[in-house]
């Protein structure tokens, strides 16, 4: 993403998140876009891990931006988990807060260590207290769920696909990960995999088509065809 088009991608991602939560009948209060972050206020939102464009998700609790409160809540989390080691990892998105990330790490980490005597391991801790300083609030979490990243669906146009096998579904998913929306060309119900990953229903006619061939196409092949599985082995496809 470069400069002026970043907002377009982020806005589409917010719309995809909203659409996905509605389709899953998930209740949420608000969705806020902050630089590099999207805050979704709700519960049980792990379904978002199949939304292309998200790098990872964390279930966080919001607290006032007060170091005493942050220390107290972080200490409660560590006491409940009772890990063999820990570290504190702060991201100060809101630069108006006077303490820098490293200072916050040291203050919170020292409080936890002095109270629990649990050692600090910076490389491979058994528990990481994540703290994000955003919009005058502190968000605390302990887990990052890896998602499928890629580009938000519908940021790179529409492609058509004929679904006859699982390879065709995979080819469509790989194009969706590149930001394309997909329209199924044969008369079948949309596979659940494509729905789960955010396929939009549209009547628009695609100008491009996806094929699941693994053989390298000749130079004279139709430029309107995409072969996302090109060169992949059967093991890689599985």
Image (spheres, helix red, strand yellow):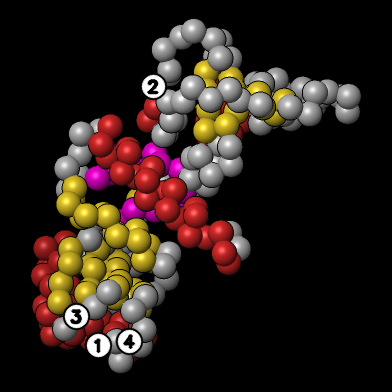
Residue 128: x and y in percent read: 30, 67
Q: Residues within 10 Å of mark 2 (few under 14, many from 20)?
A: few
| Mark with earlier residue (2, 1) | 1
Reading the image, the residue beneath label 1 is: 107
Q: CA distance from mark 4 to mark 1?
A: 18 Å
Q: Looking at the image, can residue 88 be seen?
A: no
Reading the image, the residue beneath label 3 is: 65
Q: In the displayed structure, does residue 16 sit left or right of residue 168?
A: left
Residue plotted at (72% across, 25% down)? 225
Reading the image, the residue beneath label 2 is: 192
Q: CA distance from mark 3 to mark 2?
A: 42 Å
Depth check: give the residue in front, 212 or 186. Answer: 186
Residue 230: x and y in percent read: 72, 29
Q: In the displayed structure, does residue 188 sit left or right of residue 87?
A: right
Write the start and end of the magenta stretch as one range: 45-58
Secondary structure beneath label 1: helix
Q: Nearer the viewer, mark 2 or mark 4?
A: 4
Q: CA distance from mark 1 to mark 3?
A: 14 Å
Secondary structure beneath label 3: loop
Q: CA distance from mark 3 to mark 4?
A: 11 Å
């Amino acid at each position: 993403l470069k400069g002026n088009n970043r907002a377009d991608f982020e806005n589409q991602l917010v719309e995809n998140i909203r659409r996905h939560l509605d389709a899953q009948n998930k209740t949420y209060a608000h969705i806020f876009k902050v630089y590099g972050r999207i805050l979704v206020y709700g519960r049980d939102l792990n379904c978002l891990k199949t939304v292309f464009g998200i790098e990872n998700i964390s279930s966080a609790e919001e607290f006032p931006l007060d170091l005493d409160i942050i220390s107290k809540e972080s200490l409660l989390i560590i006491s409940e988990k009772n890990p063999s080691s820990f570290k504190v990892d702060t991201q100060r998105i809101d630069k108006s807060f006077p303490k820098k990330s490293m200072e916050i790490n040291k203050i919170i980490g020292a409080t936890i260590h002095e109270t629990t005597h649990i050692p600090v391991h910076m490389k491979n801790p058994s528990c990481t207290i994540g703290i994000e300083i955003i919009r005058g609030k502190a968000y605390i979490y302990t887990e990052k769920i890896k998602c499928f990243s890629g580009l938000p669906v519908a940021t790179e146009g529409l492609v058509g696909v004929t679904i006859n096998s699982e390879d065709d579904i995979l080819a469509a998913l790989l194009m969706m990960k590149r930001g394309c929306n997909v329209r199924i060309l044969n008369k079948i119900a949309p596979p659940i995999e494509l729905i789960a990953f955010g396929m939009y229903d549209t009547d628009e006619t695609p100008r491009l088509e996806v094929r699941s061939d693994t053989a390298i196409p000749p130079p004279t092949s139709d430029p309107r065809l995409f072969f996302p599985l090109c060169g992949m082995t059967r093991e890689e496809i599985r």
